[in-house]
Amino acid sequence: MRAVDVREVSFTYDDGTEALAGIHFRVEEGEFVAVLGSNGSGKTTLIQLLVGLLKTNAGRIEIGGREIGSLEAEELYQRVGLVFQNPNDQLFAATVEEDCAFGPRNLNLPEAEVQKRVTESLAAVAALPLRGRAIHHLSFGEQKRVSLAGVLAMRPAVLILDEPTAGLDPAGEAQMMQLLKKLNREEKMTVILATHSVDMLPLFANRIYVLDRGRVLQEGPSEEIFRHQEMIVRAKLRLPYVSRLMYEMKRHDGVPIDGLPLTIGEARAQLLELIPKEMILPGIEESGS
Amino acid sequence: MFDLFSDIFTYRDNALTRIDPRVKLLIALAALVAVVSAERPILPFGFFVLCLGTVAALGVPAKLVALRLAAPFSTVAVLVVIHTFVTGTTPLFTLTLGGWTLTAKAEGFRQGLFLGNRVLGALSIVLLLGIATPAHRIFQALRGFRISKEWVEVAILMYRYIFVLLDRVGDLAAAQRLRLGYRAPRRGLASFSALAGATIVHSFEQARRTHDAMRLRGYRGTMPFGPFPALKRRERGILLLGLAGILAAYAILEWGVAG
Ligand SMILES: Nc1ncnc2c1ncn2[C@@H]1O[C@H](COP(=O)(O)OP(=O)(O)OP(=O)(O)O)[C@@H](O)[C@H]1O
Ligand SMILES: [Mg+2]
């Protein structure tokens, strides 16, 4: 089934800024899709349309096969959940536990079920030990994970995140992406994320939409997206660093590289094939990745 | 400046923080009534000493206590001064200030001290309550007493966003200072009004985004609260003991029914 179907949607802000111009955007159930675009390309606008915070000027948005306007709030918010870019916008309760319980209590669930959901969603983001803590005593990374837990407690079919890794340190970024991957692969949750950081995406996203000035420039699996160098540059983005290196070696140094590796693992495999066996020192420890 | 709002102590585990907030709230309320209605100075002063002593015993740094009491202390000082010069008949001494003759009077001084003593007694009770109970537990207790939902909700949101706003205003002010915004009084005034304007805009924006975020999690105008378990036997005991203690102190110190 189709989780999200956006057809020919445009959106213009009150001040006349045309943020989206006739875009198509489709996500199947269980997919992990990234919306990639530079600052001001329209990512947040698209996301806010998907959760009904903004209303389209033209076009049609369907969530789980139903037109978004025809869904009751209660139904809609169990189908789509949004994690805001800034956790302060979202975390309003005094403690972690109360913030996570907010959604389930709004659904009038029995208290035992509320507690169960709080525990499960905090566990899912590795934040169980934070349960009794005050929100304003948490670090930024912890706040980010707790705000994700608060949305997970609603058990949305589609999880939407605006810049989930912005402002996180490298370890925090990796942890966040691993959490999302796990939710996607193990809990079968559909994940849509908006971002402008390209390095991690090929490892996680099934498909990528490239957005530029309110238009979709290209859509497809990451291999296909990053093959179009000029398009990436036009969208004010860049290749993942490892791909850039391989691209330069291929183009300027004539190294016979096949296609364009997008991850360190792929690049490593290719380089190993090119380096003569006798040049490789024996006895070096086998590493995991 | 932000130390004033520090609440790390309320999250410590000790005998006082463990007590149900409703019990603490009721005992504090009874103590407040006792202090405010006391006719003799000894009861308010006793509470002042007791509460500050407990606060110290909980390991709260004196600096924080001083910070929190600074404003009330100056209020009390003003209260005493005004009363001294306005009320009473028995002159203590006379001051001449630019042609004005002010006479300090004994009754006024005594009355000022007495009122100030009450104010400090009451405030030390609130201080102790605030150090032994996180704000959200107080809000919870208020809900437990069926205080209007709207008020409690507004209080919760205000409490949470004070910290966000303080952070942001602190950053803005620092950014202004780094660009010499407060170098001259004139410029300082302009910077300060810009800061005030920005703060208002920020709070509105924050409110809008937070309201959006709440709606997305099913908020329909009333905040849901968890259930209230009945008070445990031990808590009921503490409540009774606390109330009885206050009553006994009041009886002995105010009515003089010494045993
Ligand atoms: N409330 C608003 N009023 C008017 N114009 C707006 C508003 N919000 C966004 N815009 C404009 O709409 C366009 C798209 O903005 P949007 O926030 O969707 O971009 P984005 O891709 O999320 O950018 P970023 O990566 O910086 O978050 C921009 O040109 C922006 O200036
Ligand atoms: Mg954005």
Image: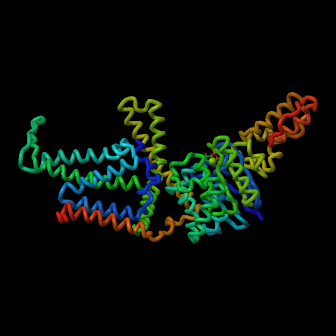
Q: Residue at x 87, y 32 (%)?
A: A250
Which quarter of the rendered picture does the N terminus of chain B lie within? top left
Q: Nearer the viewer, residue A54 or B51?
A: B51
Can see residue A94?
yes
Q: Residue furthest front?
A: B259
Quadrant position of residue B15? bottom left
Name the side, left or right, on which A13 lies relative to B98: right
Q: What is the x, y in percent for residue A222?
A: 80, 47
Q: Nearer the viewer, residue B103 or B255?
A: B255
Can see residue A5?
no
Q: Residue at x 79, y 38 (%)?
A: A230
Q: Nearer the viewer, residue A264 or A202?
A: A264
Q: Residue at x 66, y 46 (%)?
A: A165
Q: Residue at x 13, y 49 (%)?
A: B108
Name the side, left or right, on which B202 lies relative to A172: left
Q: What is the x, y in percent for residue A122?
A: 62, 57
Name the side, left or right, on which B206 lies relative to A177: left
